C-alpha cells in the first residue's frame, strides 16, 4: 500500500499539462506600444480596462470588422470610436475561426462617466 501514493503522484504528473509560460510587463503612469501581447500578462497599476473578444469565421469575404469604443453610449457613433480600440495581441486560430481580442484605450477610472462601451461593427461590402 505504501507504493500506491507515489504511483498516483507519478501518474498525475504525467497526465497534467505543462504550465504555460508568459511574458509579464507592468504598466504604470505611462503608455507602451507592442506589436503583439500574445501569451502576456499585463498589469495596469490601479486601472481597469474593458476588453472585447470576438470569435469570427476566418473566411469572411466582403465583410469588414470595425471595433469601436467610447466612454459614453452616444460616443460609439462618433468617428473617434474606431481609434479608441486597439488589438490586444494577434488573432488566435481555432479551426475555421479566429479569436480577435481588443481593448479600449481609456481605462474605466479615466472615463468622465466612470463607464465604458465597446462593440464590433460588421460592415457588408
Image (tube, rainbow, N blue to C red):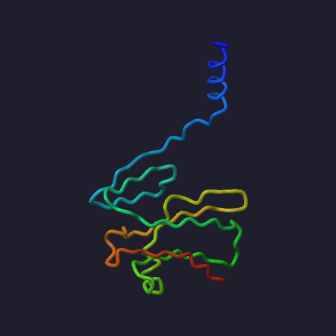
Q: Quadrant of the C terminus?
A: bottom right
Residue 7 image offset from top left, x and y in percent: 66, 19
Q: Which residue occupies the extreme front position in the image?
A: 1
Residue 86 image offset from top left, x and y in percent: 46, 68
Q: Which residue occupies the extreme top position in the image?
A: 2
Left/right of residue 72 with respect to residue 30 in the rendered view? right
Q: Which residue occupies the extreme left position in the image?
A: 29
**Residue at horizontal 50 percent and vertical 41 percent from the top:** 21
**Residue at horizontal 48 percent and vertical 65 percent from the top:** 51
In which quadrant of the rendered view does residue 110 lie? Answer: bottom left
**Residue at horizontal 64 percent and vertical 29 percent from the top:** 12
Q: Is residue 55 above or below residue 64?
A: above
Q: Is residue 45 above or below residue 70?
A: above
Residue 57 image offset from top left, x and y in percent: 69, 67
In which quadrant of the rendered view does residue 113 lie? Answer: bottom left
Question: Which of 6 and 14 lies nearest the eye of the viewer?
Answer: 6
Left/right of residue 114 with respect to residue 88 in the rendered view? left
Q: Is residue 78 above or below residue 8?
A: below
Q: Is residue 14 above or below residue 24?
A: above
**Residue at horizontal 44 percent and vertical 45 percent from the top:** 23
In which quadrant of the rendered view does residue 5 lie? Answer: top right
Question: Which of 106 and 46 lies nearest the eye of the viewer?
Answer: 46
Left/right of residue 104 with respect to residue 62 in the rendered view? left
Amino acid at each position: 500500500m505504501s507504493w500506491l501514493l507515489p504511483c498516483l503522484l507519478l501518474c498525475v504528473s504525467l497526465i497534467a499539462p505543462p504550465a504555460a509560460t508568459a511574458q509579464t510587463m507592468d504598466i504604470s503612469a505611462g503608455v507602451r506600444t507592442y506589436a503583439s501581447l500574445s501569451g502576456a500578462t499585463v498589469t495596469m497599476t490601479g486601472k481597469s480596462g474593458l476588453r472585447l473578444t470576438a470569435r469570427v469565421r476566418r473566411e469572411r469575404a466582403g465583410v469588414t470588422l470595425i471595433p469601436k469604443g467610447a466612454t459614453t453610449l452616444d460616443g460609439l457613433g462618433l468617428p473617434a470610436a474606431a481609434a479608441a480600440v486597439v488589438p490586444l495581441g494577434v488573432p488566435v486560430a481555432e479551426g475555421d475561426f479566429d479569436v480577435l481580442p481588443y481593448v479600449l484605450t481609456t481605462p474605466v477610472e479615466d472615463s468622465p462617466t466612470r463607464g465604458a462601451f465597446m462593440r464590433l461593427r460588421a460592415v457588408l461590402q
